[in-house]
Amino acid sequence: MKFRSVKGTRDMLPAEAPAWHAVERTVRRVMQDFHYREIRTPIFELTGLFSRSIGELTDIVSKEMYTFKDRGDESLTLRPEGTAAVLRSFIQESLGEQLPLVKVYYIGPMFRQERPQAGRLRQFHQFGAEALGAPSPALDVEMIALPLRVYQELGLKEFAVKVNSVGCQTCRPKYKELLKTELLKVREQLSEDSQKRIEQNPMRVLDSKEERDQRATAHVPLLKDHLCDDCRRHAAAVASHLDLLGIPFEEDPRLVRGLDYYTKTAFEITSTALGSQDALAGGGRYDLLVEELGGKPTPGVGFAAGMERLLMVLEKNGTTFTDLGPVLYIVAMDEASRRWAFKTAFALRSRGIAVEVDHLERSIKAQMRDANRVQAQHVIVVGERELASGTGRLKNMASGEETEVPLDRLLEG
Ligand code: AMP
């Protein structure tokens, strides 16, 4: 019986490691530059945390979560996104009492039982950040600037930023009622999914990808024309801060996104290099969520970005990442040389020098080929004669230059 990986999951194979590492390194460096510190939360939480925060009626909670009972009959869920767990930790550990503004980032796997397709996995990886404690629109823009910095560092060029305001407790409920009335008038023309959403989640109907929904809702009133003064001012400040950083963006009054907790700003970054699943990152403000999860009222804003999608764009762009080969490859000719190579490699590695030796008792020629394959920077061939004389020839593989070196020196320093 041969086992295969679970549908919608992938291995990161060794050949892909340099690309993943480059992305992770870039994320960490950019986060450091913006002074965000890493937080790691467990990959599973109590199910209620997600249903409470993301919203019972969202696709994620209603049909995509990996939920199971553990042996103690507790309902647990593999995290479908990062924000809920970060906020749970923020509240539980009273992080807000230690700092007035808590700025954290994460990198890790997320789990959603979606229909697998290009760019849609059931275990995928995200990097993201949250800033908790300030209502400033500048921070909303920081959440757009952070992933863009990562993309720019990695050489990405074709992306679009879409921004919207989804309102707040003051203006959204009134607008929702208005929208509901309008949607009921065109009910028959809507897709089945959208018809179901009219009652509970009418704003989601507006960002439906279905053409019939778009046609039927072309003339319904939009929230941008019904925002309260506070939300309107906030949206204008977000726009002006985006201008300040020279970030081109498009106002998309239909952008809602699939999580219920957003207030005011919602945004999405898409790539023209991707197919139908073109979203690279998304995020927004969630000023009510900390309180909703039992904490003190704390404004917050964050983003999450898909790693696999970013890697897909990098591959499309032809960006390559290579491993650095070992500094030294010791080619050994016989049993005594192999023992010497084994010991010397160990000594050099303990001084932080990457060394490769042969473990397959291959011929000198095959070992030389291997040294080339792994892109060793230097090679030294050691046999009976070298051990007797105590010197060997160290070859610089890039220049071809050879230098005589005392073997003791390799062991010592
Ligand atoms: P979300 O948490 O839904 O806002 O997603 C943020 C980003 O994560 C998206 O823009 C995608 O880049 C990525 N993402 C979300 N769901 C998946 C998935 N099923 N497979 C791969 N990437 C995903």
Image: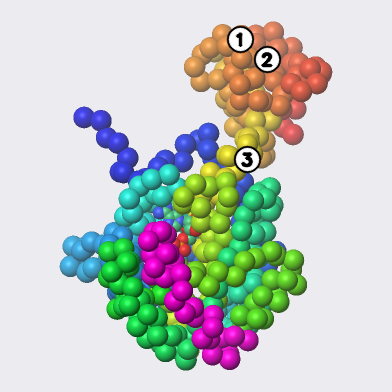
Between 39 and 334, the one lying in front of the other is 39
* Residue 321, position as x, y percentages in the image: 63, 38
* Residue 147 in view of the camera: no
* Residue 165, position as x, y percentages in the image: 54, 77
Q: Is residue 19 magenta?
A: no
Between 237 and 56, the one lying in front of the other is 237
Q: Identify the residue at horizontal 45%, vertical 88% (top origin).
A: 169
Q: Does the CB distance between marks 1 and 3 fall below 8 Å?
A: no
**Magenta segment boundaries in residue numbering:** 205-233
Q: Is residue 109 above or below residue 332?
A: below
Within-10-Å neighbours for mark 3: few <14, some 14–19, many 20+: few
Q: Give the side of residue 114 with respect to residue 2, left or right.
A: right
Tell me the number on the disc at residue 317. Answer: 3
Query: How far apart are labels 1 and 2 at the CA level?
Result: 8 Å
Instruction: Place residue 179 in its image quadrant.
Output: bottom left
Q: Secondary structure at mark 2?
A: strand
Residue at numbered disc 2: 381
Within-10-Å neighbours for mark 2: few <14, some 14–19, many 20+: some
Sequence-wise, which precedes: disc 1 or disc 3? 3
* Residue 190, position as x, y percentages in the image: 32, 66
